[in-house]
Image: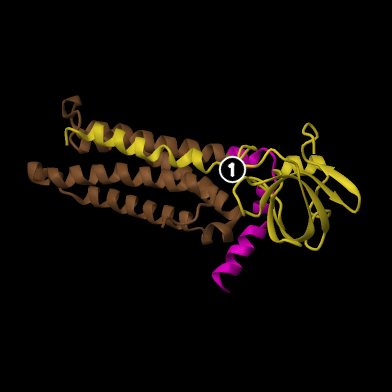
Amino acid sequence: MSIEAVLAALEQAPAIAALRNSTYVYPLVNVLHVIGIALLFGAIVPLDLRLAGWRRGAGPVDPLARLLLPVAIFGLALAIATGLLLFATDARAYAESWLFRAKLVLIVAALLNALALRRIDWRSGDAARPRIARAGVASVLLWLGVIVVGRLIGYDLPPLG
Amino acid sequence: MRHISQVLAAVSLALLPAAPVVAHHGWAWATGEEFVLPGTVKSVRHGNPHGTMVLVTRSGSWTVEIGQPWRNQAAGLSPSVLKRGTKVVVHGHRSAKKGQRLMKAERIVIAGKSFNLYPDRPS
């Protein structure tokens, strides 16, 4: 079965068809998607900025991460779950959209960046600082990129150039 | 890294104009003139966030935006009424962009019967 056939079958699944034609549920899923993004971005940006060296006087990273990471991860999970539903309602068109593909690439890059950050040995002290700072800045820029191309999918823009 | 807030502010500002320029919801992107387009439905997608159909017309292939599910339902435009092969006359507004074969429907006439998506708007 080709990918296109799989995506077409996904679109035709009864629950997905119901979502596509719903009056209230689709907008609600859309709202939850935005809330997920807001929680993720709103929690990760202050942490990233702190990693990048901004407001170092505000305190150590660890308690900040313990507060903000669960919120960011919850937001990410909510955004992914609702995003999969929204994708399914028009799967073939999204799969063909260059903006949607760019969004997926940026999400993967942002997640790899986050994983790389976790693998840095924090005990190495000042030596790791530039790497941590770069990862923090990259995180802000990548998630910002995800939001920008994500919002532009709906406008079906032709590729630049 | 002490200038991070300035960098962020600059990036956000640089990105700002990208959004509103291309907004195509509402009517602002279309001309104010009433536009009538007869044709045959080549393909139609009902459903959220709003429906779209491709019409084969004498002036080539046109994309016609229809309403979101509740609006189409209220107008009586169910998938069994508006489907591939249906002959339609679409009343609405065409894109203000020159040469772009795109319009937004206000009212669709099928076999002499009017299906009004926007009863409050003249069409």
Please report the residue visible at 42 percent of the width from the left and 55 percent of the height from the top: A160
* Left or right of B113 on screen, residue A146: left
Look at mark 1 in the image and give the residue it sits on: B24
Q: Quadrant of residue B115?
A: top right
Main secondary-structure element of the magenta-colored stretch: helix
Please report the residue visible at 19 percent of the width from the left and 33 percent of the height from the top: B3
Q: Which residues are magenta?
A: A1-28
Q: Colour of chain B?
A: yellow
Q: Quadrant of residue B17?
A: top left
The chain letter of the brown chain reads: A
* Left or right of A108 on screen, residue A99: right
Q: Foreground: B45 or B122?
A: B122
Amino acid on which disc 1 is placed: His
Q: Find numbered disc 1 in the image and state the secondary structure of the residue it sits on.
A: loop
Q: Name the image quarter holding the N terminus of chain A.
A: bottom right
Locate residue A32, reporting x and y percent: 53, 38
Locate residue B118, reporting x and y percent: 77, 37
Does the magenta-highlighted stretch encompass residue A3? Answer: yes
Residue A119, above or below B117: below
Does the magenta-highlighted stretch encompass residue A134? Answer: no
Colour logic: by chain
Q: Foreground: B65 or A86?
A: B65
Residue B2, above or below B116: above
Please report the residue visible at 67 percent of the width from the left and 59 percent of the height from the top: A12
Q: Name the image quarter holding the C terminus of chain A.
A: bottom left
Q: Residue furthest bottom?
A: A1
Q: Counting other residues with Cα less than 10 Å from the Cα at mark 1, is it few (<14), some (14-19), or many (20 or more)?
A: some
Locate residue A145, reporting x and y percent: 37, 46
Locate residue B76, reporting x and y percent: 83, 44
Q: Foreground: A96 or A71?
A: A96
Residue B21, above or below B53: above
